[in-house]
Amino acid sequence: MNRNKQSSQKRIRLILIFSILFGNVSNTIAQSQYLSKTGHISFFSNAPLENIEAHNHQVLSLVDVAKNEISVNVLMKAFEFEKSLMQEHFNENYVESDLYPKAKFEGKLVNLGTIDFSKPGTYKLDVEGVIKIHGIEKNIKTKVEISIDHNQLIARGNFRLNLSNFGITIPQVVFQNIANEIDVKFEILHNLIKP
């Protein structure tokens, strides 16, 4: 009689262990990738004679939780400026959008393992990778704030870019109007890709 009880208790334990293990595996697979097609990136140039700001709402981004990876693609012509002449100069004279239509970032979310994707919450993470602008690649490290809530992941942060590092030169004539160092902000709402 005792053996039968012990045997049935072992079976129950095994069933519980398997259900927990497979439950976690399917939960991880289900919450593996988050996609955004309408992320927001802006930049701000603070120069002695003029401030310039531009916004882009056509940002494609993918966060792959299983691989700790994030990729972001930005269409340069989608940046919108207050003045159309600024937008024209930005695309033709500075970033040369016809030759280099996209900016790209590919990197790792360094401490992604600290996030519990089953619970809503906000976490600060390190991100590092390679940013490519104007055909030139540079390593970058920055902080990102990740918020998880109801099958959505929001990535927020900011960093500074030195334009001359990417072969973008500011002519002497407009040196007082355009800063060589710009502030970049992003807020990208990703939705869970459901299997």
Image (cartoon, rainbow, N blue to C red):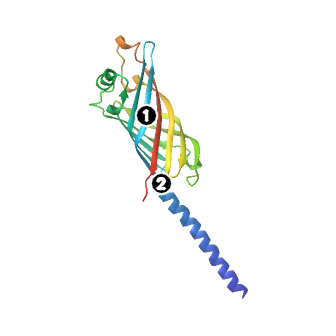
Residue in view at x 63 percent, y 76 percent? 12
Dot 1, how many residues are within 10 Å of its Cα: few (below 14), some (14-19), or many (20+)?
Answer: many
Residue in view at x 41 percent, y 24 percent? 163
Residue type pointed to by label 1: Ile
Q: Position of residue 49 (x, y in %)?
A: 43, 12
Answer with left or right where residue 66 lies relative to residue 3: left
Residue in view at x 45 percent, y 13 percent? 48
Q: Which residue is mark 1?
A: 41
Q: Position of residue 139 (x, y in %)?
A: 45, 34
Q: Does residue 134 sit above or below 154 in this rendering?
A: above
Disc on res. 32: 2
Q: Position of residue 27 (x, y in %)?
A: 52, 60
- At mark 2, the secondary structure is loop
Residue type pointed to by label 2: Ser
Q: Position of residue 79 (x, y in %)?
A: 36, 31
Residue 83: image quadrant is top left
Label 1 vs 2, first from the N-terminus? 2
